[in-house]
Image (cartoon, rainbow, N blue to C red):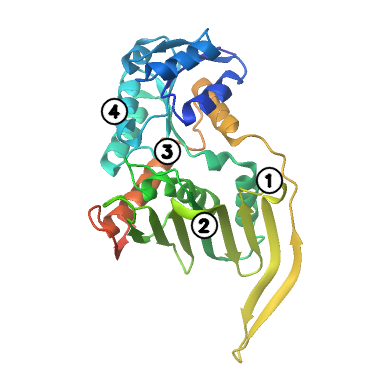
């Protein structure tokens, strides 16, 4: 098995976490880190003196590395990923893939033309709990899915370069696409900018799918409690994935409601099941998938096409609220649906 080397651009929040996982993969190693902050690079040199450091991303593009991992602000994703692909490097870029649809489409096409892996850091697609939930949904154990509700709220981290839709919603949108295996036909969004004009800090997205299935995504930087929850409501059972509860990350509720011919609603209350889940750090599985794609040419789970679909949904939500208004709501039919 060929030894793989990686170059990492960005040593902020995600950079050290990615570096740790890349270095633990079999026959793989982090070879170089680039960051514009010399102080951050000094930390790398002190902790991992065998890793080369540079303040120029170009040095990584020209280096003899197999893959480039990009953990930088969203506005830089397109430029850095494009340069890496043009230099013949496989690319893993943090979510979201880009901040607009046209750039995402270009990156996906460029990777296809050059036979290179383009992957997006949709880490929750690699969560063992999310994969168990996907298996349960796809097997029909919950019956027909009526609605999915997601919450991703906390007090901070406040961003000045992007709004909460582009910061937090990629996680839940990617989870929805992954567990349902469908893309929405419509998007309706409402967002509010409370602290800084034109930067939405609370948003609600309503997604419509084929049939009568709907999904609601609530994201916020202004909330007193940390909540990371996905609730799937089926006509036979219901499920709750709670990322903040490691001991009971996934629960299946044998309860629901039925409408009979009279019409009277009757309610079912049954047992709660907590599946056993073998835990592996999702980020490690993500990095392993990237390495496997480079070695074998297989399509990674969170490939560029998935990243493009997520960007399309985020862009549709952004368009419904408008970037220069504090509050607004409208509906947009997804292109191509």
Q: Between disc 3 and disc 2, whose residue precedes?
A: 3
Residue 179 vs residue 205, the one in the foreground: 205
- Residue 150 - label: 2
Q: Between disc 3 and disc 4, whose residue precedes?
A: 4
- Count how many numbered circles sit on residues in the image: 4
Q: Quickly name the residue at label 1.
A: 246
- Residue 3 - label: none
Q: Between disc 1 and disc 3, whose residue precedes?
A: 3
Mark pair 4, 2: CA separation: 31 Å
Q: Quickly name the residue at label 4.
A: 79
Mark pair 3, 2: CA separation: 18 Å
Mark pair 3, 4: CA separation: 14 Å
Toward the bottom, the furthest residue is 262
| Secondary structure type for disc 4 | helix
- Disc 2 crowd rating (10 Å Cα; few below 14, some 14-19, many 20+) is many
Mark pair 1, 3: CA separation: 24 Å
Q: Between disc 2 and disc 1, whose residue precedes?
A: 2
Toward the top, the furthest residue is 50
Q: Are marks 2 and 1 in contact (CB under 8 Å)?
A: no
Figure quadrant of residue 282: top right
- Residue 95 - label: 3
Q: At which x and y percent is residue 193?
A: 32, 55
Figure quadrant of residue 283: top right
| Secondary structure type for disc 2 | strand
Q: At which x and y percent is residue 256?
A: 65, 72
| Secondary structure type for disc 1 | helix
- Disc 4 crowd rating (10 Å Cα; few below 14, some 14-19, many 20+) is few
Q: Are marks 1 and 4 in contact (CB under 8 Å)?
A: no
Question: What residue is shown at x 69% (from left), y 38% (from top)?
Answer: 279
Question: What residue is shown at x 24% (from left), y 58% (from top)?
Answer: 325
């Amino acid at each position: 098995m060929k030894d793989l080397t990686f170059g990492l651009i960005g040593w902020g929040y995600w950079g050290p976490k990615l570096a740790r996982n890349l270095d633990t993969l079999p026959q793989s190693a982090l070879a170089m880190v680039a960051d514009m902050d010399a102080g951050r690079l000094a930390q790398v040199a002190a902790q991992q003196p065998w890793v080369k450091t540079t303040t120029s991303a170009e040095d990584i593009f020209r280096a003899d590395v197999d893959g480039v991992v990009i953990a930088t602000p969203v506005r830089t994703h397109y430029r850095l990923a494009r340069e890496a692909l043009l230099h013949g490097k496989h690319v893993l870029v943090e979510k979201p893939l880009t901040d607009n649809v046209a750039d995402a489409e270009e990156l996906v096409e460029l990777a296809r033309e050059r036979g290179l892996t383009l992957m997006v850091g949709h880490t929750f697609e690699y969560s063992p709990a999310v994969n168990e939930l996907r298996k349960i949904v796809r097997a029909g154990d919950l019956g027909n899915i009526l609605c999915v509700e997601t919450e991703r709220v906390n007090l901070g981290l406040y961003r000045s370069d992007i709004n909460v839709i582009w910061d937090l919603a990629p996680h839940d949108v990617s989870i929805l696409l992954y567990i349902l295996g469908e893309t929405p036909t419509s998007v309706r969004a409402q967002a509010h900018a409370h602290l800084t004009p034109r930067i939405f800090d609370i948003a609600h997205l309503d997604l419509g799918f084929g049939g009568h299935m709907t999904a609601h995504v609530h994201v916020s930087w202004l909330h007193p409690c940390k909540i990371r929850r996905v609730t799937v409501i089926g006509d036979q059972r219901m499920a709750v994935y709670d990322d903040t509860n490691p001991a009971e990350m996934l629960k299946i509720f044998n309860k629901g409601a039925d409408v009979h011919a009279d019409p009277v609603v009757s309610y079912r209350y049954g047992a709660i099941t907590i599946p056993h889940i073998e835990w592996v750090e999702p980020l490690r599985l993500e990095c392993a998938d990237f390495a496997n794609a480079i070695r074998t040419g297989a399509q990674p789970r969170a490939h560029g096409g998935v990243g493009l679909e997520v960007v399309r949904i985020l862009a549709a939500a952004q368009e419904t609220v408008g970037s220069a208004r504090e509050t607004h709501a409208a509906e947009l039919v997804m292109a191509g649906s």
